[in-house]
Amino acid sequence: MGKRRGKEMSKKVACKNCKYLSEGNECPMCHSGQPVQNWKGRIYIVQPENSDIAKQLSITKEGEYAIKVT
Ligand SMILES: [Zn+2]
């Protein structure tokens, strides 16, 4: 009916604390347990030590992050 399949990858939640994208209630990165559904933009950080945007977002570990969390 109204439910779509196939593009469920976009249903991730962002961690309010570190912006890491995951699908659970607890962030696997910082274990803060503050998932946010309202986030914008998505970025995969490969080398945080060499990434300006990673520094801006205070990201220190490789992974997929939301750019903006509201
Ligand atoms: Zn987190």
Image: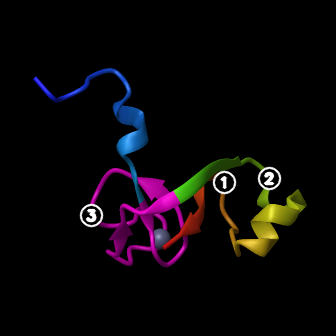
The residue beneath circle 2 is: 47
Q: How far apart are marks 3 and 1 (CA)?
A: 20 Å
Q: Where is residue 47 in the image (x, y as percent from the top left)?
A: 80, 52
Q: Name the colour scheme.
A: rainbow
Instruction: Check residue 19 for magenta coloring.
Output: yes
Whether residue 53 can be seen here:
yes
| Residue 29 sits above or below residue 62 on the image | below
Instruction: Check residue 25 for magenta coloring.
Output: yes
Q: Position of residue 65 (x, y in %)?
A: 58, 56
Q: What stretch is highlighted in magenta?
A: 14-39
> Looking at the image, which residue sits at the far front?
2
The residue beneath circle 1 is: 62
Foreground of the two, 51 or 29: 51
> Looking at the image, which residue sits at the far left?
1
Q: Position of residue 54 (x, y in %)?
A: 76, 64
Foreground of the two, 7 or 17: 7
Q: Where is residue 63 in the image (x, y as percent from the top left)?
A: 61, 51
| Residue 1 sits above or below residue 43 on the image | above
| Residue 2 sits above or below residue 18 on the image | above
The residue beneath circle 3 is: 25
Q: Which label sits in the foreground, 2 or 3?
A: 3
Q: Residue at x 44, y 68 (%)?
A: 15
